[in-house]
Amino acid sequence: MKDTVICASVVESIADFLELALQFGMIMMFACAFPLIFCFAALNNATEIRADALKLLVMLKRPVPRAAATIGAWLNIFQFLIVMAICTNCLLLVCLYDEEGKWRIEPGLAAILIMEHALLLVKFGFSHFVPEGACMGESKSSAVCSSGTDCLLSTTIEEHFKT
C-alpha cells in the first residue's frame, strides 16, 4: 500500500512539473507576440494554488516529504526552454521589424541580433557561475556530512525526525 502511495505522488509531481514546463515555455517563447499572457498566467497560477490547497487540505492526506538535491532532469528542460525563448522572441522581433521581407542588416535588426547574443551570453554565464544546487537560505540541518553528501539526503526522513 505504501508503494502505491509513493508511486502516485511521484506521478503527480511529474504531472505538476510537466504543467509548469509547458506553461513556462509558452509564456517565455511567445511573450513578445502577446505580452498580456503574463496576466493570464498569474491568474491561472493563483487559481491553481487555491485548487491544490483545497485538494491537499480537504480531499487528500498530507503528502510524504521527500528530500532532493535538485529538480533533476527538469533543470535541463527549463534551460532548453530559456534558450528557445530567447531565440524565438528575437526571431519574432526580427520578423516584425523587417516588414518588407528584405533581410538587410540595418541598425534596428543589428540591435536585435546583438541583444539575442547578449541574452544568451548572460544565460550561459549564469549557468556556468551559479552552482546547480545553490539555495537562497540553507538551513543548519542540511549541513554537509563527512562523506561530502547532504545530511538530509544521506538519511531517510523518518530517521531524521526521530531525533
Image (cartoon, helix red, strand yellow):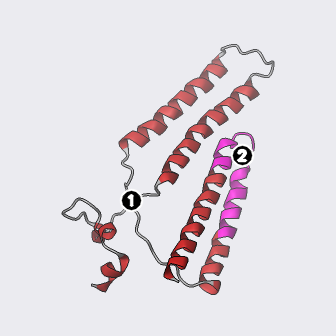
Kind of element beneath mark 2? loop
Q: Which mark is residue 35?
A: 2
Q: Nearer the viewer, residue 151 or 125?
A: 151
| 97 inside magenta stretch | no
Eyeballing the image, is 111 above or below 81? above
Quadrant for residue 31, please give it: top right
Quadrant for residue 17, please give it: bottom right
Identify the magenta region: 25-48
| 36 inside magenta stretch | yes
Residue at the location (70% across, 26% down)? 94
Give the image location of residue 7, x and y in percent: 54, 72
Residue at the location (72% across, 15% down)? 103
Q: Which mark is residue 150?
A: none
Give the image location of residue 59, x and y in percent: 65, 85
Residue type highlighted by circle 1: Met
Q: Nearer the viewer, residue 114 or 156?
A: 156
Q: Main secondary structure of the magenta part?
A: helix
